[in-house]
Image (spheres, rainbow, N blue to C red):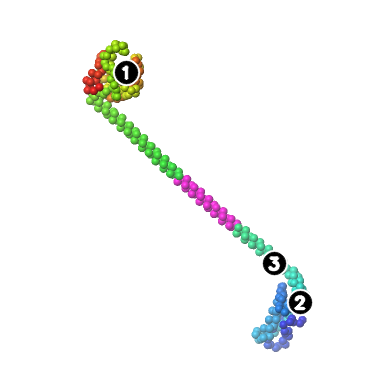
Amino acid sequence: MPAPEGIESQEPPTAGAWGEWNPTEDSVRPVRGKHRVAKQRGGLARSSTVLGVGVIAAVGASGIATAQDRPQVAISLPSLPDLPDLMTGDQGRQADGGAAAAAAAKTGIIAQQSEQGADAGEVLRHRILQQAESQQNAAEAKARAEAERAAQETAAQEAKDKLEAARKAAEEAKAQAEAKAAEEAEAAAKAAEAKAEQERAAASGAYALPTSAYTLTSHYGVAGSMWSSGYHTGLDFAAPTGTPVKAVAAGKITSAGWSGAYGYRIVLELEDGTEVWYCHLSSMSVTSGSVAAGSTIGRVGATGNVTGPHLHLEVRKGGSTVDPLAWLNSKGLNV
């Protein structure tokens, strides 16, 4: 087979002679696979395999690679049945395309490339899906973390609000308890003071006026048709309804209730047996038991036979009436 253009043909060396090393047909195996044909300037296409063989021959001819201890080899060109027509013109180029396609079909290169492309696409798709899933997981994890943080902040705020409410409630309860305790203490102090005053008055034999803010209107012994006995048996202290009525001295209440023309009446018996009647009362504060001088036992009223609210005070000794004004003055009271 003649060598392609640009490649010098080499004859195998004679046996026993050694000079230049060249590959032989026995040592050079045929090139397998697809041979790509490149288009050269000047319109001549050469096979990459042919060019490779030419380079080897040129290197051998120049004497660069030599070896005295290697066997002689002969150079030969691979059989390229599909390439002769490719060396000339467009027909060669068309034939080369057809031959390359046929060779690729025979060797299964196209199928392998298709399979490799499909595998690469599947790998890429799998990687994209993995990346998308990873991003989605990261977003979900971030959302969960934010939700947990928001829940923790809400719980902390609620706990803070409850603690503040409990603190305020405790402060209010404490203030109420302190105010109540203060009121109770004040009331107890007043009661103790009043009791002490009563005890002092009883111990010293003190006396007190029967009422206050009054005006004397009718004196004892005044005659007239207004009284059933023909004369006035007591001393009238005119005062607004509800004005406190007080015990003139320490003693005990022996009677309290309705008494006909006297209206509501309280009878106070003193330690010496003297009775003091409180008549025409609107209400009675104490109806039995011992009382101290100056303690409130009732209220001024207009019950019974009256022309207006006033206290009718009578003083009786041994069952007979005496002048209340004179009796009160004798006890050191300025009426």
Toward the bottom, the furthest residue is: 17
Residue topped by disc 2: 89
Q: CA distance from mark 3 to mark 2?
A: 30 Å
Residue at image coords 48%, 47%: 155
Question: Could you tell which of marks 2 and 1 lies nearer the N-terminus?
Answer: 2
Residue at image coords 41%, 43%: 167
In terms of image quadrants, where is residue 172?
Answer: top left
Question: Could you tell which of marks 3 and 2 lies nearer the N-terminus?
Answer: 2
Front: mark 3 or 1: 1
Q: Residues within 10 Å of mark 3 (few under 14, many from 20)?
A: few
Is residue 148 highlighted in magenta?
Answer: yes
Q: CA distance from mark 3 to mark 1?
A: 133 Å
Taking 296 as reference, is 234 above or below it?
above
The x, y position of residue 259, in whole percent, is: 34, 15
Residue topped by disc 1: 279
Q: Amino acid at mark 3?
A: Gln
Judge left or right: residue 312 versus residue 43: left
Taking 122 as reference, is 256 above or below it?
above
The residues colored magenta run 133-160
Q: Out of 256 and 10, give the one closest to the viewer.
A: 256
Q: Amino acid at mark 1?
A: Cys
Residue topped by disc 3: 113
Judge left or right: residue 91 versus residue 240: right
Q: Residues within 10 Å of mark 1 (few under 14, many from 20)?
A: many
Residue at image coords 26%, 14%: 221
The x, y position of residue 149, in whole percent, is: 50, 51
Residue at image coords 66%, 86%: 63
Q: Element at badge 2?
A: helix
